[in-house]
Amino acid sequence: MSTGSGAASAPAPTAHDTQPAHDTQPTPDSRTAPDPGTAPESPTAPEPSVAPESAMALDSPTAPESPAAPDARSAAEARSVTEPRTAAAGKPSAAPRGTGRRSSMFSSLKVRNYRLFFLGQVVSNTGTWMQRIAQDWLVLSLTGSSAAVGITTALQFLPMLLFGLYGGVLVDRLPKRPTLLVTQSAMALTGLALAALTLTGHVEVWHVYVAAFAVGLATVVDNPARQSFVSEMVGPGQLQNAVSLNSANFQSARLVGPAVAGLMITGVGTGWAFLANGLSFVAPLTSLLLMRARELHVVERAPRGKGQLREGLRYVAGRPDLIWPIVLVGFIGTFGFNFPVWLSAYADDVFHAGAGAYSLFNTVMAVGSLVGALLAARRGTARLRVLIAAAAAFGALEVVAALAPSYWLFALLMAPIGVFGLTVNVTANTAVQMATDPAMRGRVMALFMMVFMGGTPLGAPLVGWVTDAYGARVGFALGGLISLAAATAVGLVLTRAGNLRLTVAWHGGHPRVAFVPRAGDREGKKELAAV
């Protein structure tokens, strides 16, 4: 998947050379920005770090503005930060006071570097979806087996499971933009090689397996680099919006890619879809070269040293606001997101409608995913209650869709599944990034992506086997039931860990469901209640 951005080879500038973007964003280390009227006149102004503005609140409608208690923060986060200077005045730049409020749906596009990033992905992501559809259909055509489709998917995500954490360590050490140039180029070459084999008539299923595994190897570094590079482009004040727009970008391409791929497969063959994907990487590579290094938010890279992998794991293990969203998306990614297996089987075996139906199912799901991404872009916070509710709805809808008796009802149900699936992805992604210290972000996001995507090599073959042995409906329903059970279990664990209770009240003419601390424990559990 191509979503990289950055300059070709310019190293990250020092804090002295940094010139903020036209709309002046805060540095990634900043949790809140100082009032311009009270900012000191010195070039750099240290300020104690404060807690994120309820980045993962289960309930509380507004985030506290006072700094968190010292024991509520990890040592890595409790450090002072330095504000960037504006080019003209040499004073700390003004910035939004938090990320907890509803903002403009497209506000992060005002940042030139992110705008380049975004436009490059419109082209590349379309090619990515074309290849994904063509790859699944080619394997199904060559083998006639849903399990083979599952194996292909598993091979593409197996490197993330095996090497994902090491990829995160590398990303924390390396400059993001040159790293993305290498990984994006590697994925482009893989698509072009698969296109050549297919167009010349020499393609065999093992070629597709090798290509899928090669893409997976590049993804080990590409994914955490892309995830953490977003904050360098826009800063924490626009992070929720930018992550949501990334997903909207990807899902918009999902509307076009499957439709074009379906036409190509039925009209001229799968090889042309592979070729289009390989050429589409020209767009993100060009955006990498056009980035302005001075407008990036500088993040200190981790030095080389022993024990960095263990350090990252200890960091996550000591943070319940990080570990439980990762656990939840792990279950859903492993068992609930095996759509290449299910949708191809429904199109071919259940409804006997061919590649056109497979393309339609993916397109309708993309419509729902795009709606979910745009709604997420308007939200000011990434709350755990939203994550858990969306995960539960996602699993329940998969069970309902598995039992759908007609072709059109099944197709329509793909839209709400897309809405809630995308909500799970964006909410968990944003919340984990916003709660993570910038120096640890590469390792934490590598763990996030390893769990979310790396579980696929375990889940996809199992789901493919169940689908072949017991039918597509049973396989789809099983994935939904596991997702629903995981959402329920994580919700209960967080409720017990925070000593919370569920309340239902009437507010503003509408019912409101909320989690609040139990009586007598309001102070001791206030922070976890706000998670």
Image: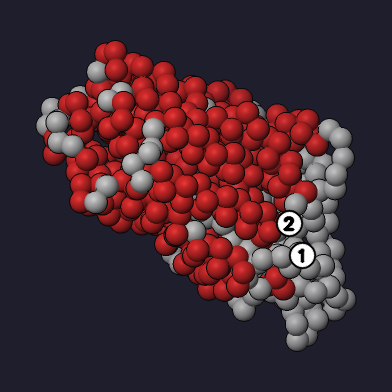
Residue plotted at (84% across, 33% down)? 307
Q: Amino acid at mark 2?
A: Pro
Horizontal and vertical percent for residue 140? 30, 31
Residue plotted at (59% across, 29% down)? 161
| Residue sitting nearer the eye, 217 or 366 | 217
Lower position in the chain sequence, tag 2 or tag 1: 1
Do the numbered discs 2 and 1 sit on residues whose CB atoms are within 8 Å?
Answer: yes
Image quarter in which the C terminus is found: top right
Q: Which residue is mark 1?
A: 11
> From this viewpoint, is residue 184 visible?
yes
Residue plotted at (85% across, 78% down)? 41
> From this viewpoint, is residue 415 visible?
no
Q: On the rendered structure, is 497 left or right of 278?
A: right
In the figure, residue 336 lies in which quadrant?
top left
| Residue sitting nearer the eye, 200 or 444 | 200
Q: Dot 1, how many residues are within 10 Å of its Cα: few (below 14), some (14-19), or many (20+)?
A: some
How far, Cα to Cα, is label 2 from label 1?
7 Å
What secondary structure is found at the residue carrying circle 1? Answer: loop
What secondary structure is found at the residue carrying circle 2? Answer: loop
Q: Amino acid at mark 1?
A: Pro
Q: Which residue is mark 2?
A: 175
